[in-house]
Image: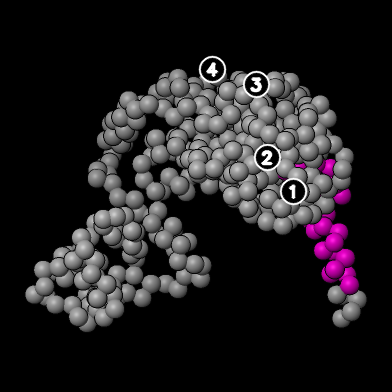
Amino acid sequence: MHINPCLFILARPPHQVVWNYEQHTQFELELDYSTRLAKLIQDPSRFDIHNAIDVDLLNADIIIEKEREPAHWKWDELSRIFHLGTKNIPYANIPQDVNEWANLYLQHCDEVLSSPRPPARIKHDSAARVALSPPLLADLHDASLARALIDRKTSRSFHEQPISIEQVSTLLYLTLGYLSERQGAREGACPESLGARRSSPSGGGLNACEGYLYVRNVTGLTPGLYAYHPDEHALSLVGPLPDAPLGRMLCGQHFINPLPFGLFITSRFDKLWWKYEHSRAYRMAFVETGHVSQTFLMVATALGLDTWLTGALSDQEVERLLGLEDSCEQPLFFVGCGHGDGQVHCKELMALIERQDAAS
């Protein structure tokens, strides 16, 4: 006999919980089961077909008869648990045709809408608003999508030149704003409370992403950290800029310190949980964040700005800075833009490479 390789154990007093993350099954073990499992983990050959606990563990696939050699996973065990644990979500009823799907989907939506919807925003909702000017969409009428796709690149060398609040307004509206141009295009089956539409797709139409501005050098806007309110196209001040440079919060990437403007993208997990009560929805948080970040980069490029992005966050520092500690809203990504020389690498790295080349 062998121990199933797709298990992890949680301490949930008074039980141990054994979770088969591949099959999406969980078992609460009493002390005698936990003790017996520990002995079998130490030596699976102790399995006894006449032991009732051993038989229960076998029937639960905690103990397996044939040894499994899983494919070598080069990342850590936690990433393996995440990937396998969000695959093959089990469904009690798989629709056999489109009519059955429609009935089940409508039933699911009715059940979701019968429960209280998460608030529009968890944090910073009561703070005073700073209204933004209407976006300058006319500035983008002549912008080519193909040209923006070709020109977009990651820059790591920025100047101290500011960007304008009008550019910030346009960026936020087209990235995270609720587009007034699409208000009349709400689908008939969509409830009014989910009628807001952004330029990027969102799982379930939930608009789970939120934005927090890092404002260092924007004309017409006091430096600080701001929350963006897409329903009003307005900002609220979260707090002043920290004494530590931006690179400190982004895992030591100090070449980005001159950046005039950036956006921390967060995900409202409570919105996703509200509609999707299974772990696969966690994947959608990152998918939606990717959609939003790409939109930001494309709009910034079309506005003639250099762009940068990173998922390397000092999470606890960023959460503390944004007032999101112990919250079901969490920062996942950062994008920024400004004026620079368009270099992919910062001048310090290039100088180091040149010295190494000269010495070789």
Do tag 3 and tag 1 residues touch (Cβ < 8 Å)?
Answer: no
**Which residues lie in the magenta part?**
336-355
Number of the label disc, if any, that sits on residue 263: 2
- In the shown orientation, is residue 138 left or right of residue 178? right
Q: Earlier in the sequence, mark 3 or mark 1?
A: 3
User: Would residue 84 be seen by someone viewing this image from the given angle?
Assistant: yes
- How far across and how far down the image is residue 84, in percent? 40, 59
Tell me if label 2 and label 4 are in contact, CB under 8 Å: no
Quickly name the residue at label 1: 244
The image shows residue 55 at horizontal and vertical percentages of 14, 69
Q: Which residue is mark 3?
A: 128
Disc 1/disc 4 C-alpha distance (Å)? 45 Å
Q: What residue would you read off at disc 4? A: 184
For marks 2 and 3 on the same chain, the one whose residue lies earlier in the sequence: 3
Q: Residue at x 46, y 62 (%)?
A: 78
Give the image quarter of residue 178. top right
Mark 2 nearby-residue class (10 Å; few <14, some 14–19, many ≥20): many
Q: Three-letter amino acid code at disc 3?
A: Ala
Q: Earlier in the sequence, mark 1 or mark 2?
A: 1
Name the amino acid type tagged 1.
Answer: Ala
For marks 2 and 3, give the CA distance.
Answer: 20 Å
